[in-house]
């Protein structure tokens, strides 16, 4: 990056007088000082791994091979006179050991022994030359393919300008791990996901990948992941899918990991150990996934979705909403198609787990079936949550494209029974005397008395 000398011509002011030749003298241009030439440095970087290759990032046997490649670019970040600069270092050669020769130019006048940061690739450096872009920015544009952009590296060194050179004090080290995810439990024709998200246990998205092919194999760069549960959400042919995995030991930057991701979708089941499974699978099934999505605006939100128990509570018997005309929650007297955001999980407490609130008590107990690992406790879904589940199941669990798809959606799950053509309580109040219930005969909502002879069925819900 040689800096060309620049010359400037002075503006010429020509004045003419009618009678004097002396006034016609032309002044010589004022000579401008030439800008000093930059200092060009050529040095060698140690190999990323052993053995050179003609690809910067490629897949070997149970490993990712990462090597420097000719014509790749590395940012050399440094400061001169309190101003940050970035030199564009070009890899001009890679020898048989994998060591790279780089050439770059720093500003003239850069002091000898100036500290610098090496950032690979060049695009990973901040635009203001002050450091490395944050992880979220670096991971934002992944497409699922194996490329050099997944291998972000940062090192440190000292620039010598008296005798031009670069002393690398810290070899550029990988900032991320590279994962190869193999997607399962979906048909080969449906593997073209429009997006693939990786989230932590709290539902915070770590990265989103937009795949470019339908192979079902995705290469994804991820920062160091602490031990814990991680979630995977995908949209495939406009349908939502979900999976989760447990990381037993924290991952290491620069390592290569392979993982099979078994996706589940609406209508699949949650087993007693908290794993997702196909509805036809073996294992102890306890709930059916009825909604996938994040509802974080509620008092007791769900981070990933909702599921319904496989049978009615209270041994299938109906019960009252409560035994008193007492205002318990915030009233919702709006149209039932426009319930405000509310989670019934917030009412899973000692107050509601009592004989005063039979519907809540029945839902919390769920016929003595324990809630699966990694899920919330059982609770009575709100009207808002019932509507979420009905809308999610439309035309997915059946062909009616209405409330009946949820009502009849338990067919084919061993040990499960469909919702009955009857009314089911929600946790949402209409006023101090009445609460909302959903009639699965016609899909209509009604506000009915809490404490008289009117009773409804109960089906418990889970958040996960």
Image (cartoon, helix red, strand yellow):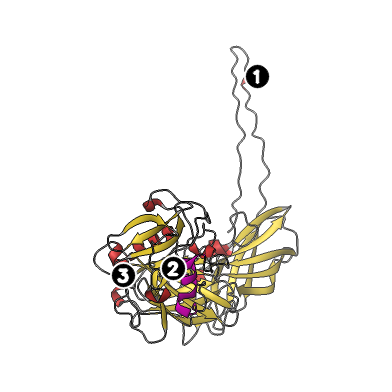
Left or right, residue 419 beside residue 97: left
Rendered image quadrant of residue 3: bottom right
Cα–Cα gap, marks 2 and 3: 19 Å
How dense is the environment of label 1, judged by Cα within 10 Å: few (below 14), some, or many (20 and up)? few
**Which label was assigned to residue 420?**
3
Cα–Cα gap, marks 2 and 1: 95 Å
Do callouts 2 and 1 mark residues in contact (Cβ within 8 Å)?
Answer: no
Rendered image quadrant of residue 310: bottom left
Q: Is any part of residue 157 visible from this angle?
A: yes
The residue under the point 61% across, 40% down is 8
Q: Does dot 3 land on a helix, a strand or a loop?
A: loop
Do callouts 2 and 3 mark residues in contact (Cβ within 8 Å)?
Answer: no
**Which label was assigned to residue 54?**
none
Question: Residue at label 2?
Answer: 306
Indicate whether residue 361 is drawn in magenta.
Answer: yes
Tell me residue 431's x, y (percent): 47, 51
Indicate whether residue 180 is drawn in magenta.
Answer: no
Rendered image quadrant of residue 428: bottom left
């Amino acid at each position: 990056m040689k800096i060309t000398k620049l010359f400037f011509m002075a503006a010429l002011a020509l004045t003419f007088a009618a009678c004097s030749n002396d006034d016609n003298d032309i002044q010589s241009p004022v000579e401008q000082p030439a800008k000093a030439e930059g200092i060009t440095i050529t040095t060698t970087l140690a190999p990323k791994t052993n053995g050179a290759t003609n690809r910067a990032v490629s897949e070997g046997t149970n490993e990712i091979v990462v090597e420097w490649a000719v014509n790749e670019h590395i940012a050399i970040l440094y400061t001169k006179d309190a101003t940050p600069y970035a030199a564009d270092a070009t890899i001009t050669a890679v020898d048989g050991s994998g060591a790279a020769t780089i050439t770059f130019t720093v500003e003239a006048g850069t002091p000898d022994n100036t500290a610098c940061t090496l950032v690979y690739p060049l695009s990973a450096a901040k635009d203001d030359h002050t450091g490395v872009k944050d992880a979220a920015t670096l991971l934002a544009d992944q497409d699922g393919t194996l490329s050099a952009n997944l291998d972000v590296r940062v090192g440190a060194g000292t620039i010598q300008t008296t005798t031009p050179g670069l002393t690398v004090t810290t070899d550029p080290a990988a900032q991320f791990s590279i994962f190869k995810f193999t997607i399962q439990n979906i048909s080969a024709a449906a593997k073209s996901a429009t997006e693939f998200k990786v989230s932590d246990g709290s539902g915070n998205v770590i990265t989103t990948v937009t795949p470019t092919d339908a192979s079902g194999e995705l290469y994804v760069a991820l920062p160091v992941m602490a031990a814990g549960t991680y979630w995977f959400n995908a949209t495939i042919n406009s349908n939502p899918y979900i999976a989760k995995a447990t990381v037993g030991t924290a991952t290491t930057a620069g390592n290569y990991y392979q993982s099979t991701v078994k996706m589940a979708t609406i209508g699949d089941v949650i087993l007693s150990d908290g794993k997702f499974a196909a509805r036809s699978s073996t294992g102890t099934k306890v709930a059916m996934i009825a909604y996938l999505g994040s509802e974080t605006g509620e008092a007791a939100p769900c981070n990933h979705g909702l599921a319904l128990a496989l049978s009615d509570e209270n041994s299938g018997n109906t019960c009252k909403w409560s035994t008193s005309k007492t205002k318990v929650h915030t009233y919702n007297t709006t149209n039932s198609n426009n319930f405000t955001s509310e989670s019934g999980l917030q009412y899973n407490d000692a107050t509601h787990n009592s004989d005063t609130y039979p519907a809540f008590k029945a839902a919390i107990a769920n016929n003595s079936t324990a809630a699966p690992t990694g899920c919330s406790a059982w609770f009575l879904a709100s009207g808002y949550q019932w509507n979420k589940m009905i809308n999610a199941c439309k035309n997915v669990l059946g062909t009616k494209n209405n409330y009946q798809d949820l009502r009849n959606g338990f067919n084919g799950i061993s040990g499960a029974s469909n919702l009955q053509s009857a009314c089911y309580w929600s946790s949402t109040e209409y006023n101090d005397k009445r609460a909302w219930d959903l009639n699965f005969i016609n899909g209509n909502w009604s506000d009915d008395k809490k404490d008289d002879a009117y009773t409804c069925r109960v089906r418990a819900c889970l958040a996960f």
